[in-house]
Amino acid sequence: MFQALQIIDELEVALKSNSTERHLSILKSVTGLFLAGHDRITEEVSSVFDGVILRLIEHVESRARMELSREIAPVANAPENVIHRLANDDDIAVAGPVLAQSPRLSDEHLVDIAARKGQSHLSKIAERPQLSPVVTDVLVDRGNQEVVTKVAVNHGARFSPTGMSMLAMRANGNNELTAALTRRPDISPPLFKRLLSHATEEARQRLLAAAEPEQREAINRVLSQIAAQAGTMTVSPKEFAAAERLVQSFSQDTEHTRSKVLQFADGNRIAELIAALSILSGVPISLVSRLICDSEPFGAMVLCKAIGLEWMIAHSVLNNLPGMSNEREEKFEEMSAEYERLSTDSAERLLGYWQHCQERRQLPQ
C-alpha cells in the first residue's frame, strides 16, 4: 500500500507535466503492483488502484489500454470502474479481452453493452464461459449470423424459452446454425422437430451422417413424422384467393381489419386470418401462412407481437392454429410471459429477418 501511495504522488506530478511517456510508465508500475498482489488485496485497496488507473488510461494511447485489458481481464477482483471503462471502449481490441473474460462484468453491464455496441462487441460477449438468459436474449435478438452461431455453440450459454425459439427461427436455411442447435442438450423435442422441419436437405444429411446409431434412429423417426404431416396444415390457392378478396375489401381500415383477426381466429377461418395478418404486417401471404401453419407457435406469436396485437387477440390466434395440441395449450401461461417479454422492436427485426431470408430463397419451400 505504501508503494501505491508513492505512485499516486508521482501520478499527480506526471499529470501536470502532460508527459505521455511518464503516464505510460506509471500505468505499468501501478498495474504491475496490483497484479503482483491482487490475491491479497481488499476491495478497499482495489478501489485506490481503480481511481489511479482510471485517471491514467485517459492519458495513454490505445495500445497501452489494449495491454492493460489483456492483463486484468481474468482477474476476479480487478478494479471495477476500470473494467467498465475498458469494456465500453469503442476499440474492440481494447474492449474484447474484458468482454470475453472479466468476472467483474455483471449481467446488467453486459446487457447494456450488447444493446448499444456493434457486432464485434457482441461477438466477444458470446465467447464468455458462462452466459445467462438475459444476456443471450439480447445477443440472439441483435446479433448477426456470426454472433448467434457463436452463442449457439457455447455450451456455457443458457437460454430463455424466447431466446431458444428465436434461435430456432433464425436457423431456417442456415446449415451451420441448425447443426449447432441440434447438438445442444437443452433443446426441447418440439424445437428439435421444428429445426428438422425447416432444415435444408443438406443439413439433414449432415446431421444423420454425424449421428450415433441411436440418434440416427430418433432423427429418422422425427423426419418420418414431418413427412406424414406435410400438406396437412395448408390452405388451398382457391381459399386464399377468396380470402384475399374479402380482406382487401376493408384493408384500408386498419382497425376494422384488426377487429376481424379475432373473428377469423375464433371462427377457425384460417385463410381469412392469414390474409388479414398479411395486410396488417405487410408480410407476404406465403410467409404468414408458413408461420401460422408451423408445428410450433413461436413464429405466429412473433407475427402477432410485431403488429401490436393485444395478448387476448394473440391468444385466440395461437389457440386456433392448425394442429394445436393439448400439450401446447397447457403452455399458454408460459407463452403469455414470453409475449410480454418480447418487445415489438425485436419481433419486427425477427420478422424482417425471415422475410429477407424468404426473398433470397434461403427458406426451404
Image: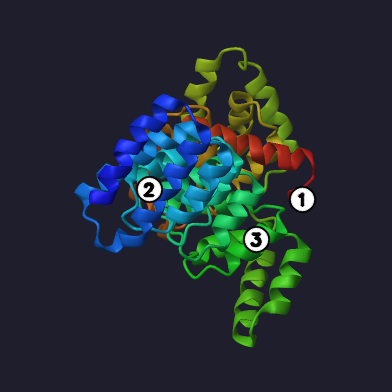
Marks 2/1: CA distance?
62 Å
Marks 2, 1: nearer the viewer? 2
Circle 2: residue type: Val
Q: Residue at x 65, y 26 (%)?
A: 282
Q: Sort mark 3 into few (<14), some (14-19) or many (20+) by Cα contacts within 10 Å.
A: many
- Residue denoted by label 2: 30
Task: Tell me, yes or no, whether the two marked residues, 3 and 2, touch with CB atoms within 8 Å.
Answer: no
Secondary structure at badge 1 equals: loop
Marks 3/1: CA distance?
17 Å
Q: Which one is in front, 172 or 148?
A: 148
Does label 2 or label 1 sit earlier along the sequence?
2
- Residue denoted by label 3: 178
Q: Say whether residue 294 is left or right of residue 115.
A: right
Q: Outermost residue, bottom direction?
A: 213
- Residue denoted by label 1: 365
Circle 1: residue type: Gln
